[in-house]
Amino acid sequence: MSDTIDGYAEALLAVVRAEGASGADDEIFRFAQALEANDELRNTLSDPYVPAERRQQIVEDLLQGKASNVTSAAVSLVVGAGRAAELPAIARALVAKGAAAGGKHVAEVRSAVALSDDQKTRLAASLKSATGKDVEIKVIIDPSVLGGVVTTIGDTVIDGSVRSRLAQVKSHLG
């Protein structure tokens, strides 16, 4: 992990903790995922020719009423500093540091649809049983999964997606 990404993650974690903004790390993570998935938004927020104030206003407009003030300020800070392209990596590092502080590992779960709190709780219990690790679930909506989930914990990938099952069936038939 680069020093810049690590430094920003540490700083954001300190702000989130100091403000007592539980859930801000998740909001930052979700914004970063949306940024990663939207080429136009990523290009605009990463464009050095767009004034920093304009890029920050775009962030504030997008997050207004949808995220905490801490989240809006944190994302705006990163974007204003010209680090929008690195925001997904910063958010992942932030979440990993927060989870590690709580004795957990991050499980990135790709799903075609959002998961309910009950589904996340059951999935966390299943992953703990399978891996022996306490996990914090971070859901990434990915329509290419089709159904089921693809879970990544560190270097371990558990693919329970419909897409992979269809590929397995196809390879057995063909």
Image: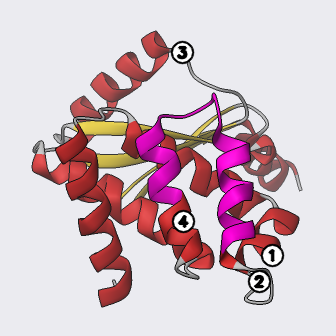
Mark 3 sits on what residue? 116
Magenta span: chief secondary structure: helix
Mark 2 sits on what residue? 47
Dots 2, 1 in contact, CB < 8 A? yes
Q: Amino acid at mark 3?
A: Ser
C-alpha distance separating marks 4 and 3: 23 Å
User: Of callouts 4 and 3, which one flags the residue occurring earlier in the amino acid sequence?
Assistant: 4
Instruction: State the residue at coordinates (65%, 49%).
Output: 60
Q: Secondary structure at mark 1?
A: helix
Q: Amino acid at mark 2?
A: Asp
User: Of callouts 2 and 3, which one flags the residue occurring earlier in the amino acid sequence?
Assistant: 2
Q: Secondary structure at mark 4?
A: helix
Instruction: State the residue at coordinates (69%, 51%).
Output: 34
Mark 1 sits on what residue? 43
Q: What quarter of the picture does the N terminus occupy?
A: bottom left
Q: Is residue 155 visible in the rendered structure shown here?
A: no
Mark 4 sits on what residue? 88
C-alpha distance separating marks 1 and 4: 14 Å
Q: Nearer the viewer, mark 1 or mark 4?
A: 1
C-alpha distance separating marks 2 and 3: 36 Å
Say left or right for 41 vs 127: right
Where on the picture, by quarter, is residue 104? top left
Q: Residues within 10 Å of mark 2 (few under 14, many from 20)?
A: some
